[in-house]
Amino acid sequence: MKQKGFALSAYAAAVSAILFLLVTCIDIHCFNRSFYEREYASLKTAEDLNMSHRDLMKATDALLDYLQGKQEHIAAVIEVNGFEREAFNERETQHMVDVLGLYRFALKLRLVSGIVLVASIALLWWKKRSQLWEMLSVAYSQCALGFLLFVGFLAIWATVDFTSLWESFHRLFFTNELWLLNPHTDLMINMFPEVFFFHMVLRITISFVVCFGLLWAAAFCYGHRFALRQRLRRES
């Protein structure tokens, strides 16, 4: 029973490491203002909306600062089509309340994952020090395989029909339809068209897969070396 408990700790550490890494990649890219500027320039967003790049970034900063807790509301006065106006209307503001809730949940998930990761490794270090890296490498390799299959499925889905994936994501994580914005009345959907989010998701996926893959390669190499040493010991 104790051995199963230690194995469970190794799997908990592996899953926690993956979740911690995923949320961190999302957090880094979602608040990378340089990415927003490059996308706006590439998509000619300011020109299409008939507003200055300065006002476009002012509206963007209001959204990002709100999510990061730097300001209480997303109020921002900008100029569009030569007229001053509030950047976001009531529907957009209410939708961002839901987005904030989702973001805070993600941060809590990362915090819990970090705690579980450290606690699990500490337990294994204390009780199974000689087998620590072996147990972690095996657990991570097995969890990584399952997670890779899931990510691969999402990648194929996104490539074939990103709209369907994006809509399914919103229906899964939001309990209302405030996310269904109107391009004729809502600035937010015009600032962030589908192609913008496709590029964002692509960047997050690439950075996550690279870090995820490096950890998997390290776990695989250690597991292979450990198995080789064990075989040599038996043969000697």
Image (cartoon, rainbow, N blue to C red):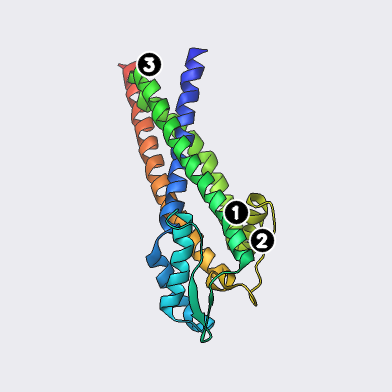
Q: Residue at x 43, y 51 (%)?
A: 25
Q: Residue at x 69, y 55 (%)?
A: 176
Which numbered marker is on residue 127? 3
N-terminal of the pair, mark 1 or mark 3, is 1
Q: In this picture, is 219 found above or below 185?
A: above
Task: Report how far apart the C-alphas of labels 2 and 1 lie in the structure.
Answer: 9 Å
Residue extending farthest right: 176
Which numbered marker is on residue 98? 1
Q: Residue at x 42, y 59 (%)?
A: 31
Helix, strand or loop at disc 2?
loop
In the image, which is nearer the foreground, mark 1 or mark 3? 1
Residue 64 location, x and y as percent? 46, 60
**In this rendering, would 205 be left or right of 215?**
right
Q: Residues within 10 Å of mark 3 (few under 14, many from 20)?
A: few
**In this rendering, would 225 be left or right of 51?**
left
Q: Residue at x 42, y 36 (%)?
A: 114
Q: Check if mark 2's residue and mark 1's residue have beta carbons within 8 Å.
A: yes
